[in-house]
Image (cartoon, rainbow, N blue to C red):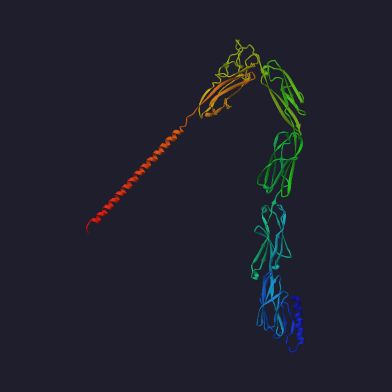
Amino acid sequence: MAPGAARCVLPALLALLGALLPGGEFPLVRGWDPSTQQSILDPGFAGAQISVTPPEAIIPRGGSVTVNCSASCAELGLEIELSKKEVAQGVNWKTFELSDVREDISPICYANCPNQTESSVSITVYGFPDLVELEPLPSWQPVGQNLTLRCQVAGGAPRDNLTVVLLRGEEELSRQPAVGEPALVNHTVEARREDHGANFSCRAELDLRSRGLGLFQNSSAPRQLRTYVLPDTNLSLSAPRVVEAGTQVLVECVLGGLFPASEAQVHLALEDHRLNATITYNGDSLVARAPMQGLAGEEGTQQLVCVVALGGRDLRTREKVTIYSFPAPNLTLSQPEVSEGTLVSVECEAHSPAVVTLHGASASRPSERDQIHLNASAEDNKRIFSCLATLKVAGQMVHKNQTRELRVLCAWDPWTMTPSLQGPTPKPSCDSPFLGSYPSPPVVDGEGCSGPRSLPSPCCVSPDGPRLDKRDCSGNWTWPEGSKQTANCQAWGNPTPKLTCSRKDGALLPIGTQMLVKREIAGTYLCRAESSHGKVTREVVVNVIYHQNNVVIIILVAAVIILGTVGTAAYIYNRRRKIQIYELQKKAQEAAALKLNALASPP
């Protein structure tokens, strides 16, 4: 029978017994007091007395408790559905042990002597929650949006003393009672930038301090929140609109106002070719730069895309890039070096669909090919011909240019010129004034005529083979080590010859430029002057003066000084030691003599 049913039946039984039995052996039961869980006896009747110890108790779930019942007579017992064990008894008292108590109970201690009365004990079971868990947070939470925290608590008793607390780090966000089984507690917060990397958790608190116990806490595993800001605008992509195949350009993708910028992923690609981007971060902005090369065979308009991904979202922007091929135009001279009066053909040609413009040709519409013909004259010496090719790509005009120089070698006219100083020896100059007859054609060194001319007609220079004279290249230099010197060596001829000076081991001697003299440059060099009209050579010698380091002598002198010092110190130390020994021996002898004299003297 359940304890509640027993309490309901017991008053009726007592009333029935009181009515049937004569002489008033049992008290008159007037009712039942639910607050005390005892029968209400007739106040005029002195019934049996009963007490229970403890009147109330709190124990852990599955624990044991001892209940003592005492009465004014020996007929007493304990009514409970659980198994009980009588562990002790005496005159008018009994002690019972209740084991493995798993829920709240109220055992009734009763006595029949001769009437029946009873008293109950309140036993409360407490237990810690079996589960305290904060539901998983979103992988990324946008800043400014609401975040709902959900905590689940299963188990735990008594529930009236159980509270659920939601925390951000150590900051308490919400405190709510645990209602239901399991208890589900929600709380909404607005995600902030400073919440990035913050730990959220929930805690169950069982407060039994009012029952003589402590405050028991069970916390969930913390969950880390990641917040982000990804603006919908401000993503910019910079790249040339047209790129020549085989060339490399730099593209740049910039985004500001994102957070945390360092965790953003950037994808730069030209069609299916991902670019190797280098990303730099500065506060809330990032810049991604990548080299992009136009590939031959992939000419045409392609899509360049930049994607910035953060928090499970991405921003992207695209730009059109046109890859084109544009070979340089062909500029040809029938002969790059001709004699005066020779017919020269200059031809400029581009690859379709490019068009060319040949500077110096008569004005005409640009076409794929243009040319001019001319009789070479003195004015054409060192004339630069330019061929400009133009190609229209994606609405833009791109250009390429080629140049060629014409050299005109002239036969000498029987003019008369006064020699002027040009170079180390007097030589005729094209700028000399006209004075009269000259016995033989002079040889003029240089790159041709320039500057004001006083001759009656333009002057040009006769072809001349290379020369490397001793006067112009002395070839015997002696320099001190560590000084700065310049090797002066001049080759002459028309056209100007190319001059190089090299040693047998391949080392080159800088000509005409200042250098720091080192002993390694000493040696014999062979200088070569070469042009289209021949080659000449000349040996030159470089001597370097340097001081021999007397390292060995210095070491020997230092060693002698050190050895001498050590020897002298050893000699002085040994001499002093011998003197000290001698003095000690002398004092010992004197002391012994005094002792003998003292013994020999009569008393």
Is 352 rendered above or below residue 214? above
Q: Say which of 110 and 551 sits in front.
A: 551
Q: Is residue 362 visible?
A: no
Quadrant where the image shows the C terminus: bottom left
Q: Say which of 297 and 170 sits in front.
A: 297
The reply, left or right, for residue 91 in relation to residue 570 is right
Is 505 rendered above or below residue 319? above
Q: Quadrant of residue 348?
A: top right
Q: Say which of 12 and 564 sits in front.
A: 564
Quadrant where the image shows the N terminus: bottom right
Q: Residue 84: give x, y in percent of width and height.
A: 70, 75
The reply, left or right, for residue 546 in relation to residue 144 is left
Is 131 rendered above or below residue 537? below
Q: Quadrant of residue 417?
A: top right
Q: Residue at x 75, y 89 (%)?
A: 22
Q: Quadrant of residue 595?
A: bottom left
Q: Residue at x 67, y 63 (%)?
A: 218
The reply, left or right, for residue 232 in relation to residue 497 is right
The reply, left or right, for residue 555 in relation to residue 284 is left
Q: Is residue 265 visible?
A: yes
Is 100 rendered above or below residue 147? below
Return the residue found at the far left. Answer: 602
Q: Residue 462: give x, y in percent of width and height.
A: 64, 16
Q: Residue 28: give x, y in percent of width and height.
A: 74, 85
Q: Residue 392: give x, y in percent of width and height.
A: 76, 31
In the rendered picture of this protein, how many numbered marks are placed on residues?
A: 0
